[in-house]
């Protein structure tokens, strides 16, 4: 099945304390966004569209190989993915949406997602179990309840969708509504989301410690 990868790379990276957009921060000498694009292509997508901050278009173009399409991202992740999705050819059968902030995702995760779509899933996310005891708290931080971790999962990217399903769900999503991932967008449209095994190496780089851990993995 034909598949296009979208990389959400238009975030600021303020929590990383970097002097540039997070996706341009380097891991072992290469920008995070380049790692994410490579993972998608190595895992089996046919081409990649990257949502980038408008002001940094040229820097992203220089950081990525020829043939990668760049689109201007939006003020939220949802807006950035929406902008990239609008540029995907209607004939493409599947779309995988990936975070630039997950540079060390193994290509095997991409392949698992593609295989699930080929097997008939409409929407599929890679997940990992929750190993810590997990609680809910009130406004002042007092624990109000403990959640049953056996039924909880941590959701990663890339998340895969039948193209028409994702496009229709974004069309139905009110402008300005912000969700933290794309599975939430299709779930809002009533679509069943299935899961495949994620990978600890697909961890998200958010704060400086995450980047340090990623550096250790690459150089080990
Ligand atoms: O901020 P967070 O790490 O959750 O962002 C997840 C991904 O979404 C990052 O790869 C980031 O570049 C992207 N993003 C985006 N457009 C925004 C905000 C975040 O593409 N406006």
Image: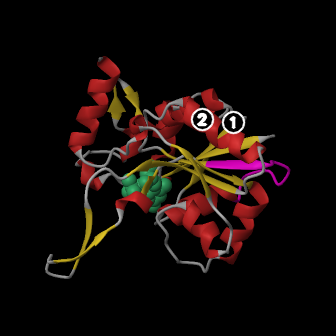
Horizontal side, residue 137 vs residue 67: left or right: left
Above or below, comparing residue 14 to residue 79 in the picture: above
Q: Which one is nearer the viewer's eye here, 143 or 67?
A: 143
Q: Which label belongs to residue 1?
A: none
Name the residue at 59% across, 78% down: 175
- Quadrant of res 205: top left
Q: Split into 4 quadrants, where in the image is the N terminus?
A: top right
Above or below, comparing residue 169 to residue 195 in the picture: below
- Quadrant of res 154: bottom left
- Magenta residues span 86-96
The percent coordinates of residue 7 (x first, y second) are 55, 46
The percent coordinates of residue 170 (x first, y second) are 66, 69
The percent coordinates of residue 65 (x first, y second) are 58, 28
Q: Main secondary structure of the magenta part?
A: loop
Q: How many marks?
A: 2
- Label 1 vs 2, first from the N-terminus: 2
Q: Is residue 91 magenta?
A: yes
Secondary structure state at the residue bearing disc 2: helix
Q: Is residue 171 magenta?
A: no
Q: Which label belongs to residue 40?
A: 2
Give the colour scheme shown.
secondary structure
Decide: few, some or many residues near mark 2? Use Cα within 10 Å; few <14, some 14-19, many ≥20.
many
Decide: few, some or many residues near mark 1? Use Cα within 10 Å; few <14, some 14-19, many ≥20.
many
Camera sees residue 81: yes
Q: Quadrant for ligand 1?
A: bottom left
Q: Which one is nearer the viewer's eye here, 74 or 85?
A: 85
Q: Residue furthest top?
A: 220
C-alpha separation, residue under disc 1 versus residue under disc 2: 6 Å
| Labelled pair 1, 2 in contact (Cβ < 8 Å) | yes
The percent coordinates of residue 190 (x first, y second) are 67, 74
Q: Which residue is mark 1?
A: 45
């Amino acid at each position: 099945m034909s598949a296009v990868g979208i990389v959400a790379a238009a975030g600021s990276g303020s929590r990383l304390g970097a002097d540039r957009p997070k996706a341009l921060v380097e891991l072992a000498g290469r920008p995070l966004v380049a790692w994410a694009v490579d993972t998608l292509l190595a895992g089996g997508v046919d081409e990649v569209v990257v949502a980038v901050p408008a002001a940094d278009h040229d820097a992203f173009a220089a950081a990525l190989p020829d043939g990668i399409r760049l689109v201007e991202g939006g003020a939220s992740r949802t807006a950035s993915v929406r902008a990239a999705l609008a540029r995907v050819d209607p004939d493409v059968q599947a779309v995988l949406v990936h975070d630039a902030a997950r540079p060390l995702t193994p290509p095997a995760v991409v392949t698992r997602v593609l295989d699930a779509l080929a097997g008939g899933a409409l929407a599929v996310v890679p997940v990992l179990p929750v190993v810590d005891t997990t609680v809910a708290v009130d406004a002042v931080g007092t624990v109000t309840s403990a959640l049953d971790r056996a039924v909880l999962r941590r959701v990663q990217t890339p998340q895969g969708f039948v193209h028409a399903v994702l496009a229709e769900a974004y069309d139905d999503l009110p402008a300005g509504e912000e969700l933290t991932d794309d599975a939430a967008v299709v779930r809002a449209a009533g679509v069943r989301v299935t899961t495949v095994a994620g990978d600890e190496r697909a961890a998200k780089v958010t704060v400086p410690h995450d980047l340090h851990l990623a550096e250790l993995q690459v150089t080990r």
